[in-house]
Amino acid sequence: MFVDVHTHVTAKEFDADRERVILESGCIALINNGYSAADNRATLDLSKKYPLVKKAFGLHPDQTWNLPVKEVDEEIAWIRKHKPFAIGEIGLDFLYAHPEKQIDAFKKFISLALELDLPMIVHSRKAEKEVLDVLEDMHAKKVILHCFSGKLKLVDRAEKLGYFFSIPGIIVHSLHFQELVKRASITKLLTETDAPFLSPIKGERNEPKYIPLTIQKIAEVKGMDEKEVENSIFANYQRLFR
């Protein structure tokens, strides 16, 4: 049983064949991560049409540094009202400006996840240490580090804090993710696509149907049977999202 804990099937890249992508995913759960206020609403609508699609609501860091504080607060109020499956996509991205504004918004989303007792799905590009600092300071729980590209000492720190790593399909050719998987316990791994991005097949649009390629590579790296990896990751998903 396959799960994709971080996907964007609301993206315009799927406008021509979204239903096929969802129904032929081979997954039992697709957690669609809201990127913006508009994408949160698209995610809500899609989850009503397809029970397979689970609704995660958040604001990507490229939104939080751009938006007035009032609009961030209004979106958090909307999210609270609409009872998501998870909080995401949230986090920090220091490719963008105003890190202090991003951090303020990130803290608000962590507080919301703690209030609602929901898993949070966290983006951390170019800000991996800072993300861990904020999460630890706020005693965050049920944390999924999406596509975590931090140094291996930060991987060790995150695992000690009890956080999970969602592994993208690019593990098939990424030495970093192969090392992360080798280092981390199988009890702390999940699978994601970040579709339509980060395809395991270079030059192709990513889709949830490629999750088995990630399972295969994790099994190879850890010296485990593929079915054992699949079952372990599904058990992690069940434990975190129960």
Image: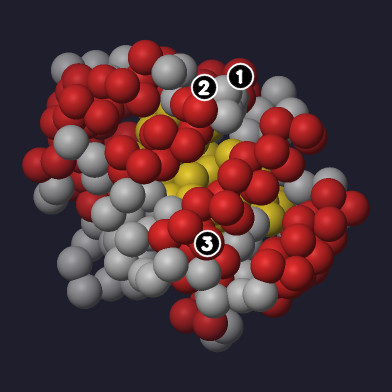
The answer to whether residue 192 of the structure is visible from this angle is no
User: Regarding mark 2 in the picture, which secondary structure is present there?
Assistant: helix
Amino acid type of the residue that numbered disc 2 sits on in the rendered structure: Asn
Residue position for label 3? 101
Between 223 and 10, the one nearer to me in the picture = 10
State yes or no: discs 1 and 2 in contact (Cβ < 8 Å): yes
Residue position for label 1? 239
Residue at 53 percent across and 82 percent down: it is 12
Location of residue 83 in the rendering, given as x and y in whole percent from the top left corner? 84, 47
Residue at 42 percent across and 60 percent down: it is 99
Amino acid type of the residue that numbered disc 1 sits on in the rendered structure: Arg
Location of residue 178 in the rendering, given as x and y in whole percent from the top left corner? 16, 35
Q: Is residue 87 above or below residue 225?
A: below
| 154 on left or right of 194 | left
Q: Is residue 125 above or below residue 190?
A: below
Residue at 31 percent across and 43 percent down: it is 128
| 58 on left or right of 44 | left
Location of residue 13 in the rendering, given as x and y in whole percent from the top left corner? 47, 80
Q: How is the image coloured?
A: secondary structure
Location of residue 185 in the rendering, given as x and y in whole percent from the top left corner? 32, 16
Between 136 and 28, the one nearer to me in the picture = 136
CA distance separating discs 1 and 2 = 5 Å
| 216 on left or right of 207 | left
Local packing at callout 2 (Cα closer than 10 Å; few below 14, some 14-19, many 20+) is some
Looking at the rendering, which quadrant does residue 151 occupy? top left
